[in-house]
Image: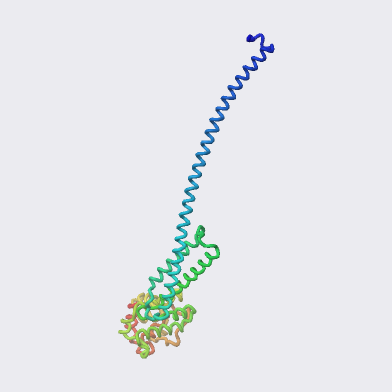
């Protein structure tokens, strides 16, 4: 077939050949573009596949972690139930012991503190947002029950600290009187306790031997209660500080705490004239000189017994 030269491109044969040439170029371009598209699509698909594999691996890991968390939560739930049950059994046993043996203080306060700590840990676990082993109502019921049990233990723990292991005396009544600001009744109760411990109810006062033998644990309980509810104004500790300040001068001491009416002639205030309110001088209560013999013995004997008592505390 004759090929048209450049001068004949406008002839039908020229148009035909030129079209064929254009189609050839277009086909080559299309094939090249298609190859590029295939490469691009392949890379994109490979990238997406890699990402999907990463996501799948991540989901598998999260699923495994979730399974482990559920397994741990199941164990935690069982442990929480068992701890709560054990705590309730121990508390019931301790309450029975307290009822039967309160005055001998056979209650183990350390054990009570341990139970209290276990309950706190259980409550912490159950209150976690991701703890889903129980439905909402069951979880609330368990939390309420454990919180109530924790409150009972705290109250019991407070009351147990008011029982002296040395004398067996329960100072709950004294605490209640002081909390009610019933100062005179609290002072009389303190006096009665001290005579009872020393077995001196008949004599109504303590001699030197009684003071030396008086249990320090009871002195601390009595002092702590007086100090707490008077906001630091009354108590044996306050009296001791005042006693030591004027170099253990019992007249100046008696004058500062309001037990002396007249320092010049050593006139001691009668118990009936004591000031049973927070308006009293610092250290005025408890009325210690009464239990040391004021009103029952010669006031001149008070000096050495007062020194002996305050230095013992």
**Colour logic:** rainbow
Q: Nearer the viewer, residue 155 or 249?
A: 155
Whether residue 111 sits left or right of residue 41 in the image: it is left
Q: Nearer the viewer, residue 176 or 128?
A: 128
Q: Nearer the viewer, residue 164 or 231?
A: 164
Residue 26 position within the rendered picture, expressed as x and y whole percent measured from the top left: 61, 21
Q: Nearer the viewer, residue 225 or 263?
A: 225
Q: Examine the rendered structure and indicate whether residue 252 appears above or below residue 34.
A: below
Q: Residue at x 40, y 68 (%)?
A: 114
Asked if residue 275 can be seen in this view, the reply is: no
Q: Examine the rendered structure and indicate whether residue 133 appears above or below residue 39.
A: below
Residue 268 position within the rendered picture, expressed as x and y whole percent measured from the top left: 40, 86
Asked if residue 209 can be seen in this view, the reply is: yes
Residue 68: name its quadrant: bottom left
Q: Residue at x 42, y 75 (%)?
A: 93
Q: Examine the rendered structure and indicate whether residue 2 appears above or below residue 211.
A: above
Q: Looking at the rendering, in which quadrant would you find the C terminus?
A: bottom left
Residue 300: name its quadrant: bottom left
Whether residue 32 sits left or right of residue 110 in the image: it is right
Residue 142 position within the rendered picture, expressed as x and y whole percent measured from the top left: 51, 67
Q: Residue at x 69, y 13 (%)?
A: 12
Q: Looking at the rendering, in which quadrant would you find the N terminus?
A: top right
């Amino acid at each position: 077939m004759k090929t048209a030269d450049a001068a004949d491109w406008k002839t039908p044969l020229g148009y035909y050949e030129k079209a064929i040439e254009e189609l050839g170029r277009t086909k080559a371009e299309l094939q090249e573009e298609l190859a590029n598209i295939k490469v691009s699509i392949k890379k994109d698909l490979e990238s997406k596949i890699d990402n999907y594999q990463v996501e799948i691996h991540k989901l598998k890991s999260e699923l495994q972690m979730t399974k482990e968390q559920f397994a741990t939560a199941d164990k935690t739930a069982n442990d929480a139930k068992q701890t709560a049950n054990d705590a309730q059994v121990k508390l019931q046993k301790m309450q029975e012991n307290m009822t039967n043996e309160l005055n001998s203080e056979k209650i183990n306060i350390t054990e009570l503190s341990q139970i209290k700590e276990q309950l706190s840990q259980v409550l912490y676990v159950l209150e976690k947002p991701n703890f889903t082993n129980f439905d909402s109502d069951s979880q609330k019921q368990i939390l309420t029950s454990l919180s109530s049990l924790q409150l009972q233990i705290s109250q019991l723990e407070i009351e147990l600290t008011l029982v002296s292991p040395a004398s067996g005396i329960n100072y709950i009544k004294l605490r209640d009187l002081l909390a009610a600001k019933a100062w005179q009744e609290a002072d009389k109760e303190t006096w009665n306790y001290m005579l009872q411990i020393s077995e001196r109810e008949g004599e109504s006062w303590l001699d030197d031997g009684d003071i030396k033998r008086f249990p320090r644990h009871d002195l601390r309980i009595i002092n702590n209660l007086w100090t707490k509810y008077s906001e630091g104004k009354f108590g044996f500790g306050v009296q001791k500080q005042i006693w030591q300040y004027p170099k253990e001068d019992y007249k100046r001491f008696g004058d500062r705490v309001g037990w002396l009416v007249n320092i010049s002639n050593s006139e001691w205030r009668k118990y009936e004239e004591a000031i049973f309110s927070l308006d009293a001088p610092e250290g005025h209560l408890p009325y210690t000189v009464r239990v040391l013999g004021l009103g029952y013995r010669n006031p001149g004997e008070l000096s050495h017994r007062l020194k002996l008592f305050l230095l013992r505390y």
